[in-house]
Image (spheres, rainbow, N blue to C red):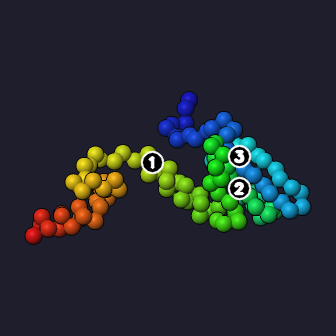
Amino acid sequence: MTRGLEPTEEYDGSVTVRLLDDRTGREEIRCTSYEDAIAVIKETHRSVTVAKLVDRNGAVVFTSAEMDIDDWETEWEHAKRRMSVDVEAYDCPHDSVGCFADDLCVQCQIDRVQERY
């Protein structure tokens, strides 16, 4: 049986954790998902000089020298959740690309207040 509708983010080994150590050199660990990569970083980041998370495009999306893995994980989960939410279609009369029905731009908020009075 299936375990339900659990979201999966598996990239077939294209997420890489890079561990850089001044004494032992560099090690790359290929992970099948961001969750696995985060777990590897949590286990190893204190024993190396720098731990980095590299996405499937080769961009470094996390580095322990600049961020805390727990904070990054929280932001990553929020971003993932925001991407999966259906947003009601809304055409901003002021052509603001950041204006949504549930998160109006400042000008639309002003218009709404003026309409009430």
Which label is found at residue 52? Answer: 2
Taking the view exactly as shown, the residue that stands out farthest to the front is 95
| Residue that appears at 63% across and 38% down | 11
Q: Secondary structure at mark 1?
A: helix
Disc 2 to disc 1, C-alpha distance:
24 Å
Disc 2 marks a residue whose amino acid type is Lys
82 sits left or right of 99 in the view: right
> Do residues under tags 3 and 2 come within 8 Å of each other at their CB atoms?
no
The residue beneath circle 3 is: 16
How would you rate the neighbour count of disc 3 (Cα within 10 Å): few for under 14, some for 14-19, many for 20 or more?
Answer: many
Determine the CA span between mark 3 and mark 1.
22 Å
Q: For mark 3, give the secondary structure.
A: strand
Tell me the SS state at disc 2. Answer: strand
Can see residue 111? yes
Where residue 8 sits in the image (x, y, percent)? Answer: 56, 40
Q: Is residue 57 left or right of residue 52?
A: left
User: Where residue 19 sits in the image (x, y, percent)?
Assistant: 78, 55
Q: Which mark is residue 43?
A: none
- Residue name at image x 50 percent, y 50 percent: 80
Crowdedness near tag 1: few (<14), some (14–19) or many (≥20) residues, C-alpha within 10 Å: few
Q: Nearer the viewer, residue 57 or 19?
A: 57
